[in-house]
Image (tube, rainbow, N blue to C red):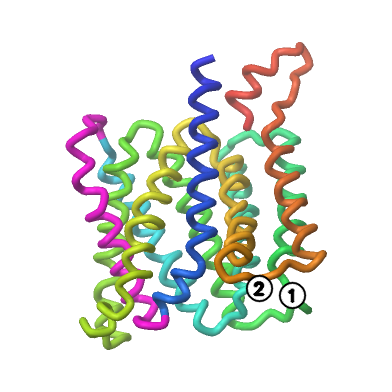
């Protein structure tokens, strides 16, 4: 019963993380109007770490420094490639290709000898169909930037696997701080080598940059780490993929955008996939509790 409660709270944390990330799209685009991608990543990671720093005094749980550093390195690679490609790639297609981490996570999980129940396997296929309907407009013509976006999707998947592994015995706040500081420090040289950031430009875009740093990076990614404590990485990935749905809904509420029938159908299919993935399989002996805990 305790396991089910923890599982529920972790799933809620993942949904909240997806909600925040999805609604942050507008602020992310606005921030990029003032600074380059590497400056943006440096600022969001450093601000994210600093925003969480005062909270470490309220938690005494140990943290894996090695796990935080590894997660930060992988996150730095994923952020850097993805943010740079967003300058040139079509937004809808980029969103779909990046979301293909929902394919890479189960592949990596199987390679690491994790079991996937049939519901989750089917849910992955359903979610991919929903993402295609939601994100892709027109024809899919792949370009050089799309290949790089696919590489970033792989590293986002690797980040989920890494965080899932180390979050079980680490404090979520401390793990977040270490990974953000690592990613921020690694982004710093590229910021100065490839861009010319100025204090004036940073101050001009302080609102979206601060929002992305504190709320999206600090809060959402910490919720994601907590969510991994009792949720298997593949199921967590499916829940996090609902970010695409929240991004579309955010566009409707904030920007007054409208949805066509294809996009509405995509949202419905995505939600069906997530709900279907939550249904535990019954084993042959009728004992689905063990399946619920081990084979998600």
Check disc 2 and report the residue beneath it: 93
The answer to which image quadrant residue 91 occupies is bottom right
Question: Residue 50 sits in which quadrant?
Answer: bottom left
Please state the extent of the stretch shown in magenta in the rendering: 33-62
* Closest to the observer, 259 or 212: 259
The rendered magenta stretch, by its main secondary structure, is classed as: helix
User: Looking at the figure, which quarter contains the C terminus?
Assistant: top right
Would you place residue 251 above or below residue 225 in this image?
Answer: below
Task: Name which of mark 2 and mark 1 comes first in the sequence.
Answer: 2
Residue 137 is marked as 1
**131 within the magenta span:** no
For the point 27% across and 78% down, which residue is it?
202
Picture coordinates of residue 150 (x, y %)? 59, 68
In the rendered image, residue 142, in percent from the top left (x then y), is placed at 68, 79
In the shown orientation, is residue 292 left or right of residue 276? Answer: left
Q: 106 and 44: which one is in front? A: 44
Q: Mark 1: give few (<14), some (14-19) or many (20+) Cα within 10 Å.
A: some
> Is there a contact, CB below 8 Å, between mark 2 and mark 1?
yes
- At x 26%, y 30%, the residue is 61
**Helix or strand or loop: what does disc 2 sit on?**
helix
Element type at mark 1: loop
Residue 79 marker: none
Of the two numbered discs 2 and 1 in the rendering, the one whose residue sits closer to the viewer: 1
Q: Is residue 88 left or right of residue 195?
A: right
On the image, the x and y values in percent for residue 183 come to 31, 62
**Which residue reaches farthest bottom?**
196
Left or right: 66 in relation to 74: left
Residue 135 lies, in percent from the top left, at 69, 67
CA separation in Å, label 2 and label 1: 7 Å
In the image, is residue 93 above or below residue 1? below
């Amino acid at each position: 019963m305790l396991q089910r409660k923890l599982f529920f709270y972790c799933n809620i944390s993942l949904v909240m993380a997806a909600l925040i990330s999805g609604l942050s799209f507008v602020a992310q685009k606005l921030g990029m109007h003032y600074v380059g991608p590497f400056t943006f990543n440096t600022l969001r990671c450093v601000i994210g770490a600093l925003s969480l720093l005062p909270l470490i005094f309220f938690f005494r749980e140990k943290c894996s420094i090695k796990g935080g550093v590894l997660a930060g390195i992988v996150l730095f690679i994923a952020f850097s490639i993805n943010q740079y490609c967003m300058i040139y790639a079509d937004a809808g297609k980029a969103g779909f290709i990046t979301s293909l981490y929902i394919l890479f996570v189960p592949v990596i999980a199987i390679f690491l000898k994790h079991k996937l129940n049939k519901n989750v396997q089917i849910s992955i296929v359903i979610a991919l169909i929903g993402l295609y309907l939601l994100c892709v407009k027109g024809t899919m013509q792949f370009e050089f930037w799309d290949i790089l976006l696919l590489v970033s999707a792989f590293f986002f998947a690797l980040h989920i696997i890494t965080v899932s592994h180390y979050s079980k015995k680490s404090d979520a706040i401390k793990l977040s701080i270490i990974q953000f500081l690592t990613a921020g420090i690694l982004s710093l040289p590229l910021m100065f080598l490839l861009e010319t950031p100025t204090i004036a430009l940073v101050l001009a875009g302080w609102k979206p940059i601060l929002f992305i740093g504190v709320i999206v990076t600090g809060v959402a990614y910490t919720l994601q780490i907590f969510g991994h404590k009792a949720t298997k990485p593949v199921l967590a990935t499916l829940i996090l993929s609902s970010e695409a749905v929240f991004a579309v809904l955010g566009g409707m509420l904030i920007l007054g955008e409208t949805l066509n029938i294809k996009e509405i159908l995509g949202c419905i299919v995505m939600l069906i996939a997530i709900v279907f993935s939550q249904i535990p399989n019954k084993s042959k002996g009728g004992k689905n509790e063990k399946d619920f805990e081990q084979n998600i």
